[in-house]
């Protein structure tokens, strides 16, 4: 079981399943890399991989490396891994989550422990591995600034980074903070600020920004004590609780959301709970106004699609959501425990099993995906498993690729800006591009590399899709660009 849940008091849960899953014809699964401890072990939690400006993938491991405190790594689409940083207690230890790509092209992340006060850090690292500790938590009396960050950072439209800490704050039950790219941190909210902790406690997930400009997230609560919440917060720190779990008889709506939220269509958000439902978690939808819908219950009636999901979804270019279940599925090699799944979810709530881990001998394909998947600009999905692989008897985890036959596209960094602003456009095989348009308006641009174009938001541009024409195809952005 992933250590984060040990810390919050989660009991071990194992979902054994026997149903047969049908794989989509265009689906191709590839194991890219197996960790062996020396180069890291146990890549865990939400969004463990992120695509850089150079087109390569970056992530973290929870432990292993030179000092047994985890690593930051780069891995190519072909599976070549390079360790960029070995954590050592003074600069942080045991990152629970992955990295976020900042608008300056560098990566930002958190370490759950270590640092000057042994309570975690925020750090910045370049694609070349230049590492800087930006903030040491528990700098203030009684850790009022927070302690032990467990969720990923996100960079909002205003340029600030926002994140959460699992502990610390005015009441010891976690915080939400804002940080400048240079490391100046402001504590915006301390949880358990209302009677009986009605506002929640112990956030272990990151935040997502809605179309209304507000930030949305979850608190995981504490198993057996508080069931967790969904909340909304203004960028200035005013918090509103939208939903409290275990509000339905028998907690059929779920409890202990640990994976955060993904933005959906029409101002909705999608998320998972680790417990509740039939005992192995649920999938839910919630609107900006707090209208809650329970979409799916894991292990009901069978566990073929997995259970106990721990990571956030990614919304792909086909409009569907893709996620992972930590346990369950049908991949129980030689009678072992099923090793989790990758699944697809439609916005209406139809779930399809895509891949079952531990389907290969000794779980060489990986076991227990604690992190979610990302969609690379090549159209494929990439992710990690907490355990499994070919090294050290399958104990250290893997990196994998799952192709569903989706077309390549481009990503925008940032996803909004004013006329005249310079925008990074990330993609694949961009060499020779002949046109860049912002919702139909032509822009001036420079092809920096096969994976990067810089473009200037043109006069007359309006909010909409960015298109890049290359010698082989026309690539569309996976999100709309908002002209400010």
Image (tube, helix red, strand yellow):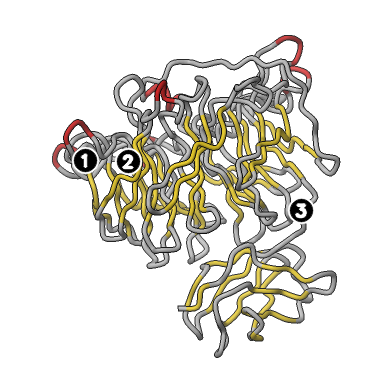
Q: Residue furthest bottom?
A: 459
Q: Earlier in the sequence, mark 3 or mark 1?
A: 1
Q: Earlier in the sequence, mark 2 or mark 3?
A: 2
Contact, mark 3 vs mark 1 (Cβ under 8 Å): no
Q: Nearer the viewer, residue 454 or 377?
A: 377
In space, the residues marked 2 and 1 are separated at their CA atoms by 8 Å
Q: Residue at x 28, y 58 (%)?
A: 184
Which residue bears the numbered disc 2? 165
Badge 2 marks a residue whose secondary structure is strand
Place residue 389 in its image quadrant.
Answer: top right
Which residue bears the numbered disc 1? 169
In space, the residues marked 3 and 1 are separated at their CA atoms by 44 Å
Horizontal side of 479 relative to 335 (left or right) equals left
Q: Quadrant of the C terminus?
A: bottom left
Q: Nearer the viewer, residue 478 or 39?
A: 478
Place residue 185 in its image quadrant.
Answer: bottom left
Percent x, y for residue 252? 46, 26
Q: Nearer the viewer, residue 90 or 431?
A: 431
Percent x, y for residue 206? 42, 45
Relative height, residue 244 to residue 367 (above, below): below
């Amino acid at each position: 079981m992933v250590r984060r849940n040990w810390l919050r008091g989660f009991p071990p849960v194992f979902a054994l399943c026997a149903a047969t899953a049908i794989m989509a014809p265009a689906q191709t699964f590839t194991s890219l890399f197996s960790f062996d401890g020396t180069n890291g072990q146990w890549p865990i939690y939400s969004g463990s991989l992120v695509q850089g400006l150079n087109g390569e993938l970056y992530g973290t491991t929870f432990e292993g490396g030179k000092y047994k405190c985890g690593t930051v790594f780069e891995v190519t689409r072909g599976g070549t891994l390079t360790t960029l940083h070995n954590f050592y207690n003074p600069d942080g230890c045991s990152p629970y989550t992955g990295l976020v790509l900042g608008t300056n092209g560098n990566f930002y992340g958190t370490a759950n422990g270590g640092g000057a006060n042994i309570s975690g850090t925020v750090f910045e690292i370049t694609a070349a591995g230049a590492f800087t500790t930006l903030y040491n938590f528990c700098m203030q009396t009684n850790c009022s600034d927070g302690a032990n960050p467990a969720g990923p950072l996100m960079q909002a439209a205003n340029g600030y980074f926002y994140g959460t800490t699992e502990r610390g704050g005015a009441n010891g039950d976690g915080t939400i903070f804002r940080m400048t790219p240079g490391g100046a941190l402001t504590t915006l909210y301390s949880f358990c600020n209302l009677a009986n902790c009605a506002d929640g406690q112990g956030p272990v997930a990151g935040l997502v920004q809605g179309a209304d400009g507000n930030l949305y997230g979850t608190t995981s609560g504490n198993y057996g004590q508080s069931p967790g919440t969904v909340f909304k917060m203004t960028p200035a720190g005013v918090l509103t609780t939208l939903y409290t779990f275990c509000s339905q008889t028998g907690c059929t709506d779920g409890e202990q959301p640990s994976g955060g939220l993904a933005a959906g269509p029409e101002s909705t958000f999608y998320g998972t709970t680790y417990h509740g439902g039939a005992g192995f978690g649920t999938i839910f939808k919630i609107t900006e106004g707090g209208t809650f819908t329970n979409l799916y219950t894991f292990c009901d009636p069978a566990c073929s699609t997995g259970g106990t999901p721990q990571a956030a979804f990614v919304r792909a270019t086909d409009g569907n959501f893709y996620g992972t279940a930590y346990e369950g599925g049908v991949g129980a090699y030689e009678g072992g425990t099923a090793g989790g799944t990758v699944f697809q979810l439609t916005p209406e709530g139809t779930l399809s099993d895509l891949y079952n881990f531990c389907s290969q001998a000794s779980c060489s394909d990986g076991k227990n995906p604690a992190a979610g998947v990302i969609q690379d600009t090549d159209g494929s999905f990439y992710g990690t498993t907490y355990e499994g692989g070919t090294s050290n008897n399958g104990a250290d985890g893997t990196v994998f690729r799952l192709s569903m036959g989706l077309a390549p596209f481009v990503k925008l960094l940032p996803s909004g800006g004013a006329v005249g602003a310079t925008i990074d456009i990330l993609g694949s095989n961009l060499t020779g591009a002949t046109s860049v348009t912002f919702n139909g308006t032509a822009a001036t641009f420079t092809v920096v590399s096969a994976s990067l174009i810089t473009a200037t938001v043109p006069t007359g541009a309006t909010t909409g899709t960015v298109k890049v024409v290359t010698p082989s195809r026309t690539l569309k952005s996976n999100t709309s660009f908002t002209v400010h």
